[in-house]
Image (cartoon, rainbow, N blue to C red):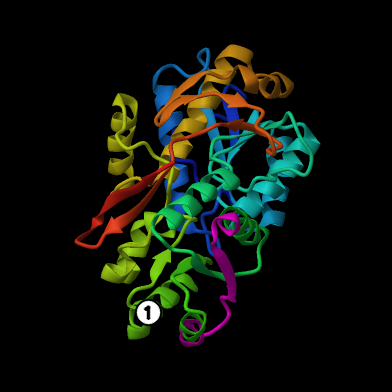
């Protein structure tokens, strides 16, 4: 498993640095753009900590491993990082991959701060070793379901692929919509885009949600639906956040606008969010996604914990309930949340947004969580 060179500037081999493992999808079939944004946030925060003198004079060092959206590869990376002596493991974007990493970290007694994955059941059993910044899927997707109801969309079709993450999302939507008169029809994303359009017409669906990977098969599905005159009035949505990234806009242009998704950012950033956002934009050469802010907040939390509790792994894990850190999106604290097996920030700001059809590079807030 190759390690990309860490751009953090900390290349200490004499044991003076404090190592943090970073799990990031950097190659296909991983969502590479999300991985790039996550790593940019992690790395920027590490640089800022080191520029300010490090942790009691010791620099932080990111030890980056590419998960490529592969759960087995992630679990093996946690083994390797534990052997390398990292104080904690951080990161990951894909929920199924984060679940494998969390299970392995808990088994090995390595603290894992999950940056971006939302699957409720991040671990099978409650654990003290894992904390999470991203909101649980059941919380965010219920907000999305409420948005659908408010928009008058009750006959919901979901184009979905086999995955515990997509299945969990479908269940959340159905549980929220059914008592309020909504229905959820599952369509296999292996259907041709044309056959999927026929199914939407046959079932008189008022909304299609893309519970599928990006760019395939999401992009061809959107193109087919947008080009089908029979579906001119159908709502297309993507709760998992595919339209957040510039790659979506580049692939779909105007067809990619007006596709609402969940975004974990405040309506207006505070001074810290404003400053970090500018730095991230410089690094990325484009507007930073919420995933980049998740990366920065991850290191802010770990740096605070390391300053207060040192590098002992057990002490770090024991510190989760005492965290109180100002993040880019608000004050971060962890608690035990019903139905969630890990220490959870409850909750980051959540909005349903889309790309403005009149100006696809601009995001519109449609609904607040």
Kindly identify the residue that appears in the image at 31 percent across and 36 percent down.
277
Vertical placement of 348 versus 300: above or below? below
Q: Is residue 237 visible?
A: yes
Q: Nearer the viewer, residue 327 or 34?
A: 327
Identity of the residue drawn at 51% across and 55% down:
26
**Image x and y of residue 205, in percent:** 47, 74
The magenta stretch spans residue 186: yes
Magenta-highlighted residues: 177-197
- Percent of width and height locating residue 66: 57, 52
Which quarter of the rendered picture does the C terminus lie within? top left
Residue 127 horizontal side relative to residue 115, left or right: right
Question: x, y (%) of residue 250?
Answer: 31, 66
Q: Could you tell me which residue is drawn at 36 percent across and 84 percent down?
A: 230
**Residue 81 among magenta residues:** no
In this rendering, is residue 107 above or below 285? above
Q: Percent position (x, y) of residue 17?
A: 56, 24
């Amino acid at each position: 498993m190759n390690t990309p060179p860490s751009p953090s500037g900390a290349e200490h081999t004499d044991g003076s640095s404090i190592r943090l493992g970073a799990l990031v999808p950097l190659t296909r079939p991983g969502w590479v753009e999300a991985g790039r944004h996550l790593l940019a946030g992690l790395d920027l925060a590490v640089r800022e900590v080191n520029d300010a003198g490090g942790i009691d004079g010791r620099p932080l060092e990111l030890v980056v491993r590419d998960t490529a959206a592969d759960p087995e590869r992630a679990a093996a990376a946690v083994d390797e990082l534990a052997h390398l002596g990292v104080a904690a493991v951080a990161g990951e974007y894909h929920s199924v991959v984060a679940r494998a990493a969390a299970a392995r970290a808990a088994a090995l007694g390595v603290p894992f701060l999950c940056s971006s994955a939302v699957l409720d059941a991040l671990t099978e059993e409650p654990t003290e070793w894992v904390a999470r910044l991203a909101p649980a899927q059941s919380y965010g997707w219920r907000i999305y379901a409420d948005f659908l109801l408010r928009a008058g969309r009750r006959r919901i079709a979901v184009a979905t692929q086999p995955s515990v993450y997509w299945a969990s999302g479908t269940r959340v939507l159905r549980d929220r919509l059914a008592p309020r008169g909504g229905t959820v029809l599952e369509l296999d994303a292996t259907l041709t885009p044309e056959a999927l359009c026929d199914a939407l017409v046959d079932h008189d669906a008022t909304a299609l949600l893309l519970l599928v990977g990006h760019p395939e098969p999401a992009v061809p599905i959107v193109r087919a639906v947008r080009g089908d005159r029979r579906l001119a009035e159908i709502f297309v949505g993507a709760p998992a956040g595919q339209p957040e990234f510039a790659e979506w806009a580049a692939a779909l242009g105007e067809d990619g606008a007006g596709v609402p998704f969940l975004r974990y950012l405040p309506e207006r950033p505070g001074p810290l969010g404003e400053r970090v956002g500018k730095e991230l934009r410089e690094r990325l050469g484009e507007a930073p996604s919420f995933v980049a802010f998740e990366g920065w907040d991850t290191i802010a939390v770990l740096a605070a914990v390391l300053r207060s509790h040192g590098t002992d792994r057990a002490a770090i894990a024991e510190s989760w309930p005492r965290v109180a850190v100002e993040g880019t999106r608000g004050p971060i604290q962890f608690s035990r949340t019903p139905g969630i097996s890990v220490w959870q920030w409850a909750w980051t700001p959540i909005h349903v947004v889309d790309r403005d059809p009149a100006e696809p590079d601009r995001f519109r807030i449609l609904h607040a969580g």
